[in-house]
Image (spheres, rainbow, N blue to C red):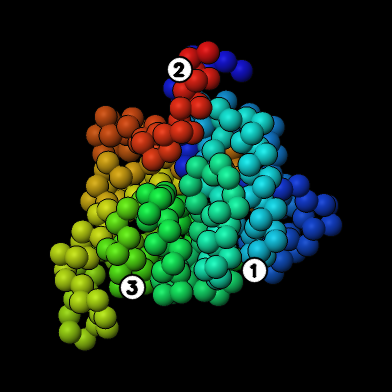
Amino acid sequence: MTHTAPGLIDVHAHFSPPTTPKSRQRILEASHANNFLVPEPYEWSLDATLDFMDETGTALQMLSNIPTGHQLLRTSNDYGLEIVAQHPSRFGLLAALPTDDAPAALEETRRVNGADGWAMTTVYNGRSLAEPHLDPLWERLDSQHAVVFVHPNAYAPATAGLPTPLIEVAFDTGRTITGMLYAGVFHRYPNITFVIAHAGATVPLLAGRLSLLGAEAWVPNPRGLTTQDIQIALSRLWVDTAASASDQQIAAAATVFGDTHIVYGSDWGVACTNTASAKRNLHALHTTLAITPDTRAAILTRAAKLFPEAARRAQSAWMS
């Protein structure tokens, strides 16, 4: 397909390597046991993804997938690189890092050649991104001026009898980003661009409380963060619009992070997102009154600033 005009740049899109019917059935049964009542086994499809992209005017997806096993993670990264090699103008890769093991994560940054950025989950095999063992990894990524996509822990157990993708992912994100804030990650490594999934989830709602109470004497604060430190750190974060383009969420994100730090995300490629829900979210973004029309338009392609090489590949296809 030849593109004649720029399209959407989607920073929050998932993929997965091929699986067997037996493994998909096993995942379905585990999902149902965790109150995630998807009707049938899910399998990611390259053809269906390209069809969805063409239907929605998406020029480029930045793919991510973060399996819990280290070997599965490496296999997934290699498969992601194959997809990008086959369709360089349509996809970029945010390669996953196994953040329960800093040396292994550092090795993966060296092993993966050609990733456009990095993907991490808030809690990986029980270990949070706020833990100090990751400092050597942050130092390396800071020296590279890397872009890091932070996704919630999709494998967390259900809460309140409801599936993890509905509410727990939002609270999981808020807990981890707050932990990273007090660990000084955002202050100590200012050259890393962090993109937080789902419009920052609960972080915008916590921001006011953190500004009001976060520097009080009764709050453990080993790095002595001031109210201004907290506000500055949060304002440096970027967020995507995946499943989060409602007026309420966009207004909160623009207030805390600034409307120039919002990029488009679809959450395509997982069982909790289908064509209809992804289109509803995109329609909400196109029509929200929480931001100006110019800002709405800018969000759709702003990720070109974060991923210039991937955007260049896409641009070459638009111009051909």
Task: Residue 34: give its label.
Answer: 1
Q: What is the x, y in percent for residue 276?
A: 56, 38
Give the left or right position of residue 222, taking residue 99 as reference: left
- Position of the N terminus by quadrant: top right
Give the left or right position of residue 279, taking residue 29 as reference: left
Mark 3: which secondary structure? loop
Give the CA distance from mark 1 to mark 3: 31 Å
Q: What is the x, y in percent for residue 153?
A: 53, 64
Q: Would you call the spot at circle 2 few (<14 residues within 10 Å), some (14-19), or many (20 or more)? A: few
Q: Earlier in the sequence, mark 2 or mark 3?
A: 2
User: Can the viewer see residue 302?
Assistant: yes
Give the CA distance from mark 1 to mark 2: 43 Å
Q: Earlier in the sequence, mark 1 or mark 2?
A: 2
Q: What is the x, y in percent for residue 207?
A: 26, 63
Camera-side residue: 51 or 105?
105
Camera-side residue: 277 or 86?
86
Mark 2: which secondary structure? loop
The amino acid sitting under disc 2 is: Ala
Q: Is residue 274 above or below residue 179?
A: above
Q: Residue at x 71, y 66 (%)?
A: 30
The amino acid sitting under disc 1 is: Asn
Task: Residue 183: give its label.
Answer: 3
